[in-house]
Amino acid sequence: MLVSNNELHLIFGSGPVGLAVLDELVARGKRVRVVTRSGQANVPVGVEAIKGDATDPRSTTEVCQGATHVYNCTNPPDYHKWPELFPPLQAGVLEGAAANEAKLIVMENLYLYGPHHGVPMTEDLPHHGHGARSSTRVHMTKALFETHRSGKVRAVSGRASDLFGPRVRQSAMGEQVFKAALNGKKAQVMINADTLHTYTYMADIGKALVTLGEHDEALGQAWHIPNPETVTTREFLRMVYEEAGHSLKLMVGPKWLMQMMGMFVPPMRGISENFYQFAEPFTVDHSKFEQAFSDQMQPTPLREAIRTTVEWYRRHLN
């Protein structure tokens, strides 16, 4: 592998997003360092894995030494504890990047927009997110770009919808769907399977975040990561089951059941703040990215992305 040594790309987080970024950087011959709390990560030969605490500015300043690009791919393990756990992760990584004058590339989601009556989402949509998780995302993106405007750090964010792809297990289109399809059992979805819903393919996230980090003109802005074609959730699942060799079997969980689960299953607490995502069209417009960087990448076609994901699950299911 030919490695470019004039840059050091540092990734906080070794979950699916961090590893997708890693895959893309390695493919481009970049020098890569991955930071995790344990110092352990499943990385290729030639990639450095080190121990660091993303919430501690002293630690992040030390591990970011020499970095030209810093990717914040962190995510709290406890979904229902975002308000307490997520802002310190962003603040710590930001301090490490700023102290070393590195570009900061941040992975975000779409919670900050909140209910939008099915209008296709663009980056300039007002931030009407409410509830614990959505409000947390609103405050975090505001803090990120205020810090950029102050000149403290050079930052850019890529925003993705619900994730699917290799290594993605905890998602609306994660293990419970692909495992059910491969076993010929029912997949469960929330509220409504017949509204349009954009899903983001994990490999495209890695390519998009690296692309954003390569271009100074992207800095100071949020960008929707390019997505495969948008279809209804039912149509998405039909393709999953076809690739798995089975006919679609589907159970739609009603709102009352989701609310009850939120009362007794901690990770689903407050889930009602996101019901709108499945009750109305949830479509993402990535034309801004396409117009700026179409020569750099194109989203993976949906059928191809689903086929690759099914094959990954076929190899990795216990």
Image (cartoon, rainbow, N blue to C red):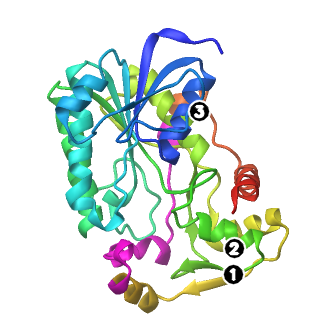
Q: Position of residue 64 (x, y in %)?
A: 30, 23
Circle nearer the N terminus (1, 3): 3
Q: For the magenta stretch, what is the residue range? A: 263-290
Q: CA distance from mark 1 to mark 3?
A: 32 Å
Q: Position of residue 271 (x, y in %)?
A: 36, 75
Q: Which residue is mark 3?
A: 23
Left/right placement of residue 250 relative to residue 104 reads right
Residue 128 shows in the view: no
Q: Which residue appears at 51% of the width and 62% of the height?
A: 170
Disc 1 vs disc 2: Cβ atoms closer than 8 Å?
A: yes
Q: Residues within 10 Å of mark 2 (few under 14, many from 20)?
A: some
Residue located beneath label 1 in the image: 186
- The residue carrying mark 2 is 180
Q: CA distance from mark 1 to mark 2?
A: 6 Å
Dot 1 or dot 2, earlier in sequence: 2
Residues packed near mark 3 inside 10 Å, few (<14), some (14 to 19) or many (20 plus): some
- The quarter holding residue 95 reads top left
| Callout 1 secondary element | loop
Q: Secondary structure at mark 2?
A: helix
Out of 243 and 166, give the one closest to the viewer: 166
- Horizontal and vertical percent position of residue 25: 55, 26
Q: In this rendered view, identify the residue nearer to me: 290 or 297.
A: 297
Q: Does 147 appear above or below 137? A: above
Secondary-structure class at tag 3 = helix
